[in-house]
Image: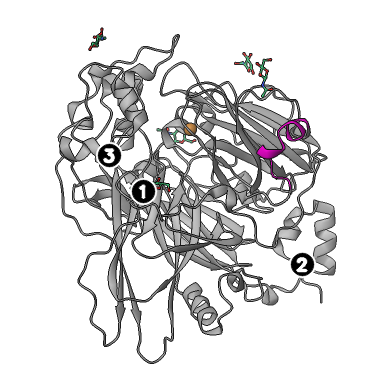
């Protein structure tokens, strides 16, 4: 019997669906059982870096529990909101094939899950690799509302391990590492809840408020540097900014001070007012010695011939970008945003908010190895770490501290240190990408009238739309505004040309729904109307053969002039999808737009999503 998957069924029209059910749907007994999770959200006290504050917990823990799935699984996530805030849960990087209603975006596909209410998300794990779930409401990621998703590949999914080694013992050890992989969630953390931080940003029109620590899996400590320790770590761009204000210096939290940040406002912007920022946001650093995250890896004497580990690095950053490195151990990157790549070995990896890398490494000498996360963002010197505690049965562990490849700014400590370049992440067994597209959309990423207001396409998306009737239930194909693009189902492949005019930081651009190919990126004005013209003029800036396949990618900073990014994406998954900057304050400041994709060919929306009840 032909088994029609649920996903396929959802994609069919009503009429075909009933025909299909009559002919080919398996009996209920044959259907695979969905993998069910219950996530109960609460707002409680916690002290991730040794300083107590209010934060979100999920099932009593921060970060939330791992959703551990296998490619092909049907998944049901029952979210119970026992916090005092509206919320929604988004599954970052999950393409939601045929289930746009479970994407978790307020005002796009659902309304907020209000305090005391429930919501049942249903989707299918059509991919494998590392992902994460997180709130898509307000700045709740900054308050800890997230957790990891690991999707194991099906046994017959081709993998790139034989490009790492041909040795059968090593391959066996890698396969066993794959079964016991470790998610590592990397976050920048503040002692002040996000709603207060946003209020301060709104009053001061300064959005680069200090962080207090970096956490790995919700654990970290506060480090304070003296001005003597800061001095050698000050980067040249930071020095340039400091020199704008006579006599200014980094604050004791190692941040550019508010009066320097105020100089980032451009003519016409609302005037920043540093005086309304409470002193403790930038000053009053108090070091803590809270416990770090420890991954204990034990090599047993008899059964392990070699020990490999697989780590899923997940950047849950609110704002920063960082360099990630494991002391003394080169990392072999095998997947980017869940997609296998041709493996590349490096000593450090740059990550921006939302991105994931799956890495493997061979451990030999028993030792405690430090995993370092060092911010490379200008506003602050910020770094954190965790520990890989490697023990070998019946062997003495080396007491020596591990030797770092990178410093507190993510810079190499010796000239031998190699950093991974994301553009080198070529898909493993890449299928050819189409050389022409059916539609081209130009969007302008810009600051919108204040240093904390942003737009993804010229005009910020107003926040009140989060509480409107979800567009998925009421598509508006004729709407004309700058923050909505309507892409008819007839356009099978589409290019997005993302333009970034003068003076802005790099933005981690994230598309919901299907992943995209990063086909071009460069500096200077983008004078062309299509990718084909641009690629003909600047062949060195484009890759139409084996471009990276991602769901989150950093634009180039534009402090030295305009930059641009071109991504190519299939339009084969009808829905209402958000595109936005993953920096939480930029998203909340309006840097977001909506794609109504194939809304002329939407799958029938199940009644439970048309008419959600408070308690599911
Ligand atoms: C900063 O100091 C320089 C000399 O050291 C002086 O020329 C300049 O006017 C000062 N700028 C301000 C804004 O005080
Ligand atoms: C870092 O690498 C660069 C390029 O290889 C090299 O010039 C520089 O000296 C290195 N830094 C240190 C501290 O070794
Ligand atoms: C919570 O969500 C509901 C439904 O979208 C909305 O009406 C209400 O205004 C929201 N409350 C807050 C405080 O945002
Ligand atoms: C939309 O963007 C264009 C420029 O791309 C701008 O001229 C126009 O004013 C914007 N529309 C609105 C309503 O802001
Ligand atoms: C784009 O056009 C501007 C103005 O017409 C011109 O100054 C610039 O050199 C052009 N850039 C490229 C890369 O062709
Ligand atoms: Cu941004």
Q: Position of residue 526 (x, y in %)?
A: 66, 25
Left or right of residue 264, residue 103 in this image: right
Is residue 529 at all visible to an observer of this figure? yes
Residue at numbered disc 3: 233
Which region shows up in magenta?
Answer: 533-544
**Residue occupying the far bottom of the picture:** 302
Res. 156 image quadrant: bottom right
Point out the tag, 1 or 3, that comes first from the N-terminus: 1
Left or right of 547? Residue 191 is left
Q: Is residue 534 magenta?
A: yes
Query: Dot 2 corresponds to which residue?
Result: 4
Residue 160's disc number: none
Q: Nearer the viewer, mark 3 or mark 2?
A: 3
x and y percent of residue 564 in the render? Answer: 61, 30
Q: Residue 339: image x %, image y %?
A: 60, 58
Disc number for residue 187: 1
Q: Say what secondary structure mark 1 lies in.
A: strand
Query: In the picture, which quadrant includes the N terminus?
Result: bottom right
23 inside magenta stretch: no
Report how far apart the C-alphas of labels 1 and 3 lie in the structure. 21 Å
Element assignment for label 3: helix
The vertical placement of 513 against 175, above or below, is above
Q: Would you identify the image quadrant in which residue 601 lies?
A: top right
- In the image, ligand 3 is in what quadrant? top left
Name the quadrant containing residue 84. top left
| Label 2 element class | loop
Q: CA distance from mark 3 to mark 2?
A: 58 Å
């Amino acid at each position: 019997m032909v088994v029609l998957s649920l996903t396929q069924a959802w994609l069919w029209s009503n009429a075909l669906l009933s025909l299909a059910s009559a002919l080919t749907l398996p009996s209920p007994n044959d259907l695979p059982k969905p993998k069910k999770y219950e996530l109960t959200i609460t707002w409680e006290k916690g002290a991730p870096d040794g300083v107590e504050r209010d934060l979100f917990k999920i099932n009593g823990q921060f970060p939330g529990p791992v959703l551990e799935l296998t490619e092909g699984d049907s998944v049901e996530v029952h979210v119970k909101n026992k916090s005092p805030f509206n919320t929604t849960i988004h599954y970052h990087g999950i393409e939601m094939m045929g289930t746009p209603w479970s994407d978790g975006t307020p005002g796009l596909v659902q309304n907020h899950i209000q305090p005391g209410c429930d919501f049942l998300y249903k989707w299918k794990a059509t991919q494998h690799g590392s992902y994460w779930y997180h709130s898509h409401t307000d700045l709740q990621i900054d308050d800890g509302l997230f957790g990891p998703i690991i999707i194991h590949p099906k046994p017959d999914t081709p993998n790139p391990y034989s490009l790492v080694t041909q040795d059968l013992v090593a391959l066996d050890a890698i396969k066993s590492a794959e079964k016991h992989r470790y998610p590592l969630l990397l976050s920048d953390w503040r002692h002040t809840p996000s709603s207060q931080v946003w209020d301060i940003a709104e009053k001061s029109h300064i959005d680069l408020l200090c962080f207090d620590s970096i956490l790995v899996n919700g654990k970290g400590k506060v480090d304070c540097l003296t001005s003597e320790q800061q001095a050698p770590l000050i980067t040249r761009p930071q020095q340039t900014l400091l020199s704008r204000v006579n006599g200014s210096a980094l604050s004791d939290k190692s941040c550019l001070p508010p009066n320097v940040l105020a100089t980032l406002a451009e003519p016409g912007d609302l005037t920043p007012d540093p005086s309304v920022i409470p002193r403790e946001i930038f000053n009053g650093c108090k070091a803590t010695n809270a416990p770090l995250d420890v991954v204990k890896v034990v090599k047993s004497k008899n059964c392990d011939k070699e020990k490999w580990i697989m780590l899923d690095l997940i950047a849950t950053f609110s704002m920063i970008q960082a360099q990630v490195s494991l002391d003394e151990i080169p990392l072999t990157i095998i997947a980017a945003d869940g997609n296998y790549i041709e493996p590349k070995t490096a000593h450090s990896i740059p990550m921006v908010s939302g991105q994931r890398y799956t890495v493997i490494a061979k451990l030999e000498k028993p030792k405690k190895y430090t995993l370092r996360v060092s911010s490379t963002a200008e506003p602050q010197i910020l770094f954190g770490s965790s520990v890989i505690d490697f023990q070998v049965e019946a062997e003495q562990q080396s007491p020596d501290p591990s030797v770092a490849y990178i410093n507190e700014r993510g810079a190499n400590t010796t000239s031998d240190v190699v950093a991974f370049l994301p553009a080198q992440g070529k898909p493993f067994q890449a299928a050819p990408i189409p050389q022409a597209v059916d539609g081209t959309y130009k969007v302008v990423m810009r600051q919108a009238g204040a240093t904390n207001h942003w737009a993804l396409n010229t005009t910020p998306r107003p926040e009140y739309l989060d509480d409107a009737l979800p567009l998925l239930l009421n598509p508006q194909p004729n709407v004309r505004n700058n923050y909505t693009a309507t892409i008819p189902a007839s356009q099978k492949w589409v290019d997005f040309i993302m333009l970034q005019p003068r003076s802005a930081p790099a933005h981690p651009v994230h598309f919901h729904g299907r992943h995209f190919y990063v086909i071009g990126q460069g500096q200077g004005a983008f004078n062309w109307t299509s990718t084909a013209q641009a690629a003909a003029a600047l062949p060195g800036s484009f890759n139409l053969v084996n471009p990276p396949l991602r769901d989150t990618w950093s634009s180039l900073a534009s402090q030295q002039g305009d930059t641009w990014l071109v991504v190519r994406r299939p339009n084969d998954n009808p829905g209402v999808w958000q595109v936005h900057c993953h920096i939480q304050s930029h998203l909340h400041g309006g840097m977001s737009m909506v794609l109504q994709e194939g809304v002329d060919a939407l799958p029938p929306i199940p009644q439970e999503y048309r008419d959600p009840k408070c308690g599911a």
